[in-house]
Amino acid sequence: MISAFDHPFLSGLLGDDEIACLLGAGADIAAMLRFEAALAEAQAGLGLIPAEAAAVIGDTLKSFQPNMAELGEATKTDGVVVPNLVRQIKLAVGEPHAVHVHFGTTSQDVVDSAFVLRLLPCLALLDQRLACLAEALAALSTSFGDRPLAAHTRMQPAIPIRAADRIENWRAPLLRHRKRLRILRRSIAVIQFGGAAGTLDMFGESSPVLRASLASRLGLADRRQWHSQRDRLADLAGWLSLVTGSLGKFGEDVALMAQAGVAIELAGGGSSSAMPHKQNPVSAEMLVTLARFNAVQVSAVHHALLHEQERSGSAWTLEWLVIPLMLQAAGAATLTGLRLSSQIVRLGNPVTGKRPA
Amino acid sequence: MISAFDHPFLSGLLGDDEIACLLGAGADIAAMLRFEAALAEAQAGLGLIPAEAAAVIGDTLKSFQPNMAELGEATKTDGVVVPNLVRQIKLAVGEPHAVHVHFGTTSQDVVDSAFVLRLLPCLALLDQRLACLAEALAALSTSFGDRPLAAHTRMQPAIPIRAADRIENWRAPLLRHRKRLRILRRSIAVIQFGGAAGTLDMFGESSPVLRASLASRLGLADRRQWHSQRDRLADLAGWLSLVTGSLGKFGEDVALMAQAGVAIELAGGGSSSAMPHKQNPVSAEMLVTLARFNAVQVSAVHHALLHEQERSGSAWTLEWLVIPLMLQAAGAATLTGLRLSSQIVRLGNPVTGKRPA
Amino acid sequence: MISAFDHPFLSGLLGDDEIACLLGAGADIAAMLRFEAALAEAQAGLGLIPAEAAAVIGDTLKSFQPNMAELGEATKTDGVVVPNLVRQIKLAVGEPHAVHVHFGTTSQDVVDSAFVLRLLPCLALLDQRLACLAEALAALSTSFGDRPLAAHTRMQPAIPIRAADRIENWRAPLLRHRKRLRILRRSIAVIQFGGAAGTLDMFGESSPVLRASLASRLGLADRRQWHSQRDRLADLAGWLSLVTGSLGKFGEDVALMAQAGVAIELAGGGSSSAMPHKQNPVSAEMLVTLARFNAVQVSAVHHALLHEQERSGSAWTLEWLVIPLMLQAAGAATLTGLRLSSQIVRLGNPVTGKRPA
Amino acid sequence: MISAFDHPFLSGLLGDDEIACLLGAGADIAAMLRFEAALAEAQAGLGLIPAEAAAVIGDTLKSFQPNMAELGEATKTDGVVVPNLVRQIKLAVGEPHAVHVHFGTTSQDVVDSAFVLRLLPCLALLDQRLACLAEALAALSTSFGDRPLAAHTRMQPAIPIRAADRIENWRAPLLRHRKRLRILRRSIAVIQFGGAAGTLDMFGESSPVLRASLASRLGLADRRQWHSQRDRLADLAGWLSLVTGSLGKFGEDVALMAQAGVAIELAGGGSSSAMPHKQNPVSAEMLVTLARFNAVQVSAVHHALLHEQERSGSAWTLEWLVIPLMLQAAGAATLTGLRLSSQIVRLGNPVTGKRPA
């Protein structure tokens, strides 16, 4: 456990248990099994496999627990978990139905569709937190919006503004990100189903109906395969980095305001091992960290657009390394943003006896 | 002239004269002058400055040519060209109207709005080229789509597909990018107008009407200032890298197909100084280069989301360094993609007397 | 456990148990305790704290086991684990010696020095693997070096070369990386000790002697504090990405050679869930993935050079997020490179009956 | 002219005329011609071409001026300027000696060696400026080093330090960068000479002597070809980003100090078009911009390590796009760092009649 997001003590600072749960290996297995079950069902519905086979496959998958050590060992060789997972499922299903498991599909259909299935609740969670954050910022504006604040341009004091003006620079982008998410969600909540090389070669004229049926059973929109068309994921990465970037600006502004301690008052700052009097604006700093982290990672997902031929093992695996990290960073940033909002005791200059006109 | 995009001989390979013209310093000056003229007009319309002043300002700007050397010298000190440009305009306008030039606005209003004004024709050009590219690929599909091709997954020959299947992996993302552009364009074709610190402090209750009038005169949508909210630009950068990334996949596939010379035949390859027989797939390679270039640059624009306080000199200038390069890369990639499409003499395996069973 | 490096089944493919062990939370705690014990010893040696206190601190730390849940909770607030760790140590040491724990030092001294202590065995391991890799490649050259191979330039067949020529392009950079590591190791195997703000303010004229004594006890070179001077770490990140990049070229070449199956024969390829006949060059692909991953991450560590003032919480934490990932990627790449070397059954074209002259 | 480094007015802010001159197209042509002349000389010395041919080639090249428009047009097709340049040279040399021009070498030998020849004076210039910067900072320390300053850790005031302490955090890395450059220079000041596929296939046993002779005539060290081994360039990119990163920290600190105007006094700040009283710390901001720019670009050069087979058109061209930009950014940062040093009128808190206890 080296990644700070999953780390025994750093995850206290940078982790997000909910995202970890929605996205982790357990959820992944569950989503892949769901795909295989829905596929068998859809195929039985079209007479492509026997109804009895689909029933047995469905029943088996309900309680199926893969041997994880074997999965890990096989993934080392195969580069993807599906061949061994399918092998284990077939053993569990047994004869004569095993041959109907994973029929006409391929690893990428399973892995990509399972990713989408795990992604959607993550996006819903992030959206909900962005809504809460926008509300929290609106509430700060209600409480403190009329207080004066020195605008700073190019790191220099400029003219006076109101606290509400600065808060709006934090809040407005979050509202736009929520709008963007609605469009992104529509684009990305789609089935991946193409078979060995994207042509659903095993199904002939049944292909479109089968794909539509499978998509519908999984609650996804029916679209043509996107095995080697990864623009949806690069878009996702961009959105995640927009979220962390806008929250990073919030954090950066708060850290700057907290320097002199005039324009903001924070509760719950971090303590120092050397200087007990200090109250470090840790939440604000973490927002900056997470923003820079995702601003770097977004590059990797754009490189993965160069997904050669019908399936690129290298570009695809690069997505696996990076996109979960970006989701965790976005999760951590939304959580930390909420924490920071709640730590703001005062925003804008203190108001003494009489407010200056 | 060090940048390969502007370079005496490398620009033959990597440049895009149209983008250079739409985006360059001349277009920038023109757009900034257009902003200042429209502002004076709008302000006169609302009685904020004398109508005569607006008329003189407008007349002056029609033929105004700034002293470029002085602009460069002043930009070194000021970090932005506008203070000196305004000074030169005021001298040209002369007394008593000079005081009404650039009234109540600030450098960022001018620079950001002028960038949007230059950006829009660039996006229109890219969109048009994407349309042509999609058509060119559709035409290749018409000509060669039925030819057989060995699908390759994980860099290994897989099952047979048709040339049309692979072409569709190149074409479909371009259609999605065009759709995305329609949304992006609406989001980004907006006025920037906030004054010194974003609050239009000089105009009181006239602010919204003035901003709407200015926006309308510039053909932009009326939106609140986004001085320190740079999500629109990060979105733009993502879109530009989606375009180059999808074209990079096209190039990568063509370069791989051209290796053995079976699955594709190209005309107009590059010659070698050492091996005169070679036909290098230069256009295909350049598409990969430009994709990787933009996949790196997109990171910078996401870092620029950390735009501190009311205006960040450092984050803003980072945009100036990177976004024009990304636009040039996208321009070069669309041009090169068109060139490559036209160089494809045959796609899919050669069809001999009899098709193999 | 979301990171693919630590993942239940993906770590079979991308993990490195040895690096995980040398770098993980357990090793971190151990190194931090080692720092605190050595500090007490060094301070007692100079009469800065009572000898008895140092003895009790040393004894306590030998068997000290922190409450990890408490560490995680406190890190959330403090942004760094040290304040709570010190608190726990002080409780364990008890009165009257607790006051002498962590005397005159600060979190960053502990965390950075503990990182260096964990890093050195990682670098030794990587160096050893690079040596093995260079030998394995030399052995391939001995076995197959004289076989003919078509050079490929710009993705096109060029003139004939020998297999040894291509192998040398894989091997020579590894030898240079080993040389670079010797220089890097000298630069980075240094103590971090500066106290609250880098000035060792608590020790006056004893500072240099104390720092030298502490460094010596930890087996590190004595250097002035580098709290906000992070060039050594950016250099480290560059080296890690050089290693993965050179191995990525090895993987890319092998994947390209394996396409037609003429120039190389591989054993132990990955199986496909859809096409049982396939032998996917998974190890080769993973080398490309890991190279691109680190080529992205190196950017983050360079951003962390902007470490503001005497200590940047945000830039420092960015290092924590990224550098361990880069070390894991380099570990995985060296392991995978060794695996790939051992999978090469033949390199260069097959030799039939008579070798062509 | 879109790149801000070469831009009509932005280059006043971000350009570096000396680097532009040392690195630009004119210097490139000159270095390539120097390579061709030295090659002919070296080959004549070994009897590989007639002495008379070498003499005519040498004489011709002394005054040779290529047709730049033709170079640009041909580069568009060939992907590299050399084939057409050689064609023009051969025409100028004429019969019967033309056949001896560019004998046994290839484009990459010419381009890479010419890059090294242009790079070395750039590195010497950067080194000299770093030396001046270190001196300028030392002078600031002499003038103001004893003044008190509030250390800031995690963006919060910490304990008092002296101005000299902070200055040392700016200066010490520059000294290390100069040391690193001495090592880097040795590694990179090497000949590139491999012929069509790196094996100097045209020269047999004469190859080592010819390469040594060529290297010596160009003032470079004799090393085996590195056509597809690009680690030296990734190292260079890392060094350039270390330089800009350390200067970025200097700029960031100064911008933070200048906020309240207590800890530093700057002359020559930038003016604002909206707020005439402001003195923007433009030089400091630009250092941050250039640091972030290079921290992004370094990633591209690491991606270019994946230089497939014997020569990668795509990875190689990516270097051409990025490395000159990084050199310009490093040039601009050293210039801007010097300017900023000279703008510091006071560093550390103002000293009033009596120093506060």
Image: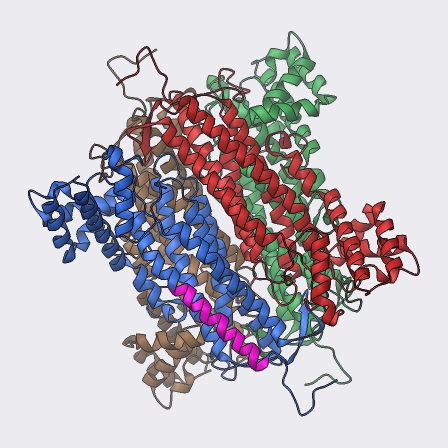
Chain colours: A green, B brown, C red, D blue
Residue at figure coordinates x 51%, y 32% from the top left: C133
Measured from the top left, where is residue D258 in percent x and y? 58, 77
Residue lying at the far right of the rendered structure: C95
Above or below residue B300? Residue D91 is: above
Q: Main secondary structure of the magenta part?
A: helix
Left or right: where D171 falls relative to C46? left
Q: Is residue D135 magenta?
A: yes
The N terminus of chain A lies in quadrant? top right
Q: Quadrant of residue B95?
A: bottom left
Q: Nearer the viewer, residue B88 or B133?
A: B88
User: What residue occupies the far bottom of the structure in this picture?
Assistant: D353
* Res B111 visible: no
Residue A283 lies in the magenta stretch: no
Q: Nearer the viewer, residue D304 or A183?
A: D304
Q: Report x, y in % for residue D345.
A: 53, 83
Is A109 on the left or on the right of A88, as rendered? left
Residue A106 image position (x, y, % from top left): 54, 23
Image coordinates of residue A156 in percent, x first then y, are 57, 76
Q: In percent of the image, x 18 and y 46: which residue is there?
A: D40
* Residue segment shown in magenta: D125-144
Name which quarter of the figure residue D185 lies in: bottom left
- Look at the picture and state if C87 lies above or below D227: below
Q: Is residue B198 visible?
A: yes
